[in-house]
Image: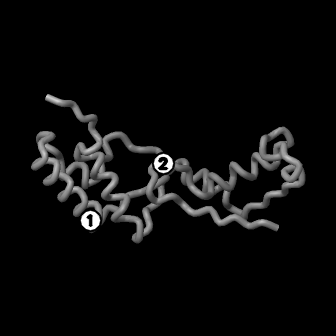
Amino acid sequence: IVVFNIIPDAASTTTPSPAALAVSLAVQAADPTSALRATSLGGAISVSIPAGTADLAAAEAAAETVVVGEVPLWESQCVTKTYTAFDMIVCYECCTEVCEIGDEVPQVAGQDVLSGYRAELCQSLCMTHCGYERPFTAA
């Protein structure tokens, strides 16, 4: 018997939720033509997921639907005026402060980020928002 604990990746905003992964794994295991069952060990796979996991995955997928015009506070309050070093630093400091200690908790795959990963995710989001990931062009 092998038990998997699937935990969310707090550093990514595009990975599916643990519930969605568990449901996907169960669907693949039930399909006799799937690549999961093509191996000699995989032919005898039996997957069981806790009751309500499929409902949770469906609810999370519905929660991922973004309402147009819904902008997080750290993006609406902290805007780079120009892409000069000074303005980008001001934007980044404002953005990380509002994101890390504000009332609005950043989310990954529709779920609030755990407090231990909040600073790391906020720093990543703010680096992108304030222009640090723009392509460099020599003048």
Q: How far separated are the C-alphas under marks 2 and 1? A: 21 Å
Q: How many numbered badges does the structure rendering display?
A: 2
Which residue position holds label 1? 102
In the image, is 129 to the left or to the right of 54? left
Disc 1 residue crowd, few under 14, some 14–19, many 20+, Cα 10 Å: few
Position of the N terminus, as image quadrant, is bottom right
Q: Is residue 55 above or below residue 32?
A: below
Residue located at (82% from left, 43% from top): 31
In the image, is 59 to the left or to the right of 28? left
In the image, is 33 to the left or to the right of 116? right
Residue 70 versus residue 11: which sits nearer the camera? 11
Q: Is residue 63 above or below residue 101?
A: above
**In the structure shown, which secondary structural element does the residue marked by tag 2 occupy?**
loop
Disc 2 residue crowd, few under 14, some 14–19, many 20+, Cα 10 Å: some
In the image, is 84 to the left or to the right of 73? left
Residue 66 at what x, y percent from top left?
42, 44
Residue 14 at what x, y percent from top left?
48, 47
Task: Name the residue at the top extreme.
Answer: 139
Q: How is the image coloured?
A: one colour
Residue located at (83% from left, 46% from top): 37
| Amino acid type of the residue that numbered disc 1 sits on in the rendered structure | Gly
Residue located at (10% from left, 49% from top): 86
Task: Name the residue at the front extreme.
Answer: 138
| Amino acid type of the residue that numbered disc 2 sits on in the rendered structure | Glu
Residue 34 at what x, y percent from top left?
80, 41
Which residue position holds label 2? 64
Residue located at (69% from left, 49% from top): 24
Disc with the residue nearer the chain's start (2 vs 1) = 2
Give the quadrant of residue 17: bottom right
Q: Tell me whether the residue at label 2 lies in contact with that at label 1, contact meaning CB atoms closer than 8 angstroms.
A: no
